[in-house]
């Protein structure tokens, strides 16, 4: 069951990436969204950013959309 949930979460993040790539400019996507890494956990999904600046920038501008 855990593997199925992990697969679903990975599909979720893959779908998010595709949507952001369509909606943002290439520069915005490559700078802010593409560097994020997805970690599947038993309690959900964890996004990892390369540094605090990227994390804060994405959180302020895109967290609500990701959560939807």
Image: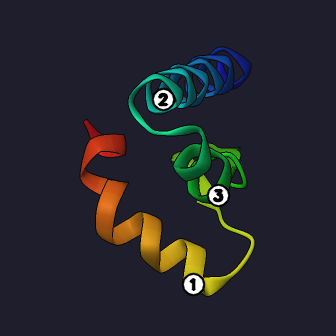
Drawn side of residue 36 relative to residue 61, left or right: right
Nearer mark to the viewer, of 2 and 1: 1
Q: Earlier in the sequence, mark 2 or mark 3?
A: 2
Which residue occupies 49% across, 39% down? 25
Which residue occupies 31% across, 71% down? 60
Q: Write down the residue under mark 3.
A: 31
From mark 3 to mark 1, how far is it between C-alphas?
A: 12 Å
Q: Write down the residue under mark 1.
A: 53
How was this image coloured?
A: rainbow
Q: Quadrant of the C terminus?
A: top left
From mark 2 to mark 3, how far is it between C-alphas?
A: 16 Å
Rendering coords of residue 9 (x, y %)? 57, 27
Q: Earlier in the sequence, mark 3 or mark 1?
A: 3
Q: Write down the residue under mark 2.
A: 16
Rendering coords of residue 61 (x, y %)? 31, 62
**Looking at this rendering, what residue extends furthest in the bottom direction?**
52
């Amino acid at each position: 069951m855990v593997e199925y949930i992990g697969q679903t979460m990975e599909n979720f993040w893959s779908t998010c990436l595709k949507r952001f790539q369509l909606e943002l400019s290439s520069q915005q996507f490559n700078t802010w969204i593409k560097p994020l890494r997805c970690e599947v956990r038993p309690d959900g999904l964890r996004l990892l950013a390369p540094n605090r600046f990227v994390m804060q920038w994405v959180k302020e501008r895109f967290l609500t959309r990701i959560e939807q």
